[in-house]
Amino acid sequence: MFIDQVHIHTKAGDGGAGCMSFRREAHVPKGGPDGGDGGHGGDVILSADRSVSSLIDYRFKHHFKAERGTHGKGSRMHGANGNDLILRVPLGTQVRHYDEETREAGELIADLTHEGEQVVVAKGGQGGRGNIHFVTPTRRAPAFAELGVPAEESWIELEMKLMADAALVGMPSVGKSSLIARMSAARPKIADYPFTTLVPNLGMVRTEEHSFVVADIPGLIEGAAEGKGLGHEFLRHIERTALILHVIDASGSYEGRDPVEDYRQINDELARYAKELIERPQIVLVNKVDIPGTDEVVARIREYVHAQALRAVGGNEYDEAFNPPQVFCVSAATGQGIDALIAATAQKVFELRVAAQELEAQDVQYGKVWELKRQERDRQFVARKLGGGVFTIEGKAVERMVIQTEWDNEEAIAFLQHRLERMGVEKALVQAGARDGDEIRILGRAFGFQVTGVYEDEA
Ligand SMILES: Nc1nc2c(ncn2[C@@H]2O[C@H](COP(=O)(O)OP(=O)(O)OP(=O)(O)O)[C@@H](O)[C@H]2O)c(=O)[nH]1
Ligand SMILES: [Mg+2]
């Protein structure tokens, strides 16, 4: 079974509470504060791993939870941090928010395409700070500590997109499955009626120098880019394949078709689906050359492929960009031309890998991008006017601070207000039109608004 989409629920660990405590010594009536911090809750992290080949592990188990942090204690004792939970997923896994109720996938969280690439899907709650942190010259004995932050939890969708190095693409029945069987140990179903292949097959091809993965994509038909037949699904699978092995049936046997016309149509479909697909390097395979009388077709195809490449560079054969695809005559039936095809494909795949690595090396942020994006989403907040002098603030980081605050403790509330001001919340409120004495609501808690800074009023 080829499993490529699952939905799972992830929950990080809650943060432990900070401790409010004072030193007790025999001869000191009231010692200084000594409450330790709560431990941080563990994160749930997805990590791309080449040795994982499918999402099958997530098919039957849907709930994943990281460890919670324990509470801080007196004598400055920290609570223990909870362990992260690392979920290994195959290369080519896309991660999205998922709404359990509407069963709809939302925003893309990450696209894990490289070995070791990671993303936090549920952030563990921060441990609350103990009262030792809140000593100031005027507040020698802080009688409050922070609560731990509850963990994030959410449903996410994981979708694995095929990560083959090369994909066999062509009309139905041109021999794609027969070719993958010849090239690798894959044993797909082969029959002489169209659409025999319904899900992509993967095969590993080993050569002395390099190994590569080839995919047998179900037959494309005209109109595939518009979602006709099974086409759209399949085009989606080759979105990230670096090399296309474009298979043509030299005998034109399926519905008595013209092989050159087939070649043109498949390229049209690729271009219609996504412009990048047609710019992708191709190797052209003219298959079934064991059938007598195919020489004329081969000659026409060579001519057409050459002419197309020439047109792309404005007819100038000496243009540096002039790079017509290689054309191989093969027979999946007799094995003719298969060794040469494998060698050429391995070489091309290797070149493309080197080029991709060079691009990655230039990108210093690579590996951190998804985490940075997550942090950015986290810090965002919006100030909204509800009317009647009431405003709300919504945003993950802001809400977390509110959750961490002990509400029956005035000092803790004053501290929260100071933090909110530093984050720019006060400024945003002024800009939204808030005035002294208005009511501000965050997560159902209400504050009286008091402007302390000086801002340009944009309201
Ligand atoms: N004579 C000859 N027949 C071939 C060759 N390659 C494939 N065939 C036959 O062509 C028919 C279709 O082959 P498949 O490999 O199933 O073709 P496909 O492109 O995978 O077809 P779909 O999965 O339906 O898109 C089968 O009957 C094969 O035996 C070849 O090189 N020579
Ligand atoms: Mg097939």
Image (cartoon, rainbow, N blue to C red):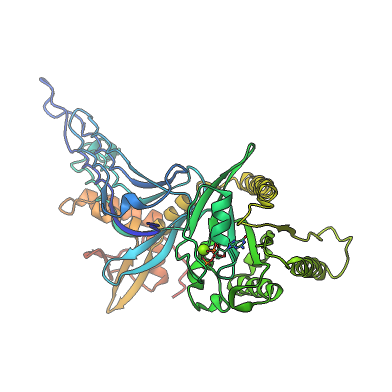
Quadrant location of the N terminus in the rendered image: bottom left
Between 219 and 31, which is closer to the camera in this rendering?
A: 219
Residue 122 visible, this angle: no
Quadrant location of the C terminus in the rendered image: bottom left
Vertical side of 215 occupied by 220: above or below: below
Quadrant hosting residue 307: bottom right
x, y percentage for residue 341? 68, 51
x, y percentage for residue 317? 88, 63
Between 152 and 406, which is closer to the camera in this rendering?
A: 152
x, y percentage for residue 452? 37, 60
Between 133 and 294, which is closer to the camera in this rendering?
A: 294
Residue at the extreme top: 26
Vertical side of 100 occupied by 226: above or below: below
Between 133 and 302, which is closer to the camera in this rendering?
A: 302
Q: Residue at x 59, y 74 (%)?
A: 254
Vertical side of 90 occupied by 104: above or below: below
Count of labels in the image: 0
Ligand 1 lies in which image quarter?
Answer: bottom right
x, y percentage for residue 7? 32, 59
Residue at the extreme front: 292
Left or right placement of residue 415 versus residue 185 in this view: left
Left or right placement of residue 451 versus residue 373 in this view: left
Residue 31 visible, this angle: yes
Left or right placement of residue 29 versus residue 416 in this view: left
Left or right placement of residue 22 versus residue 282 in this view: left
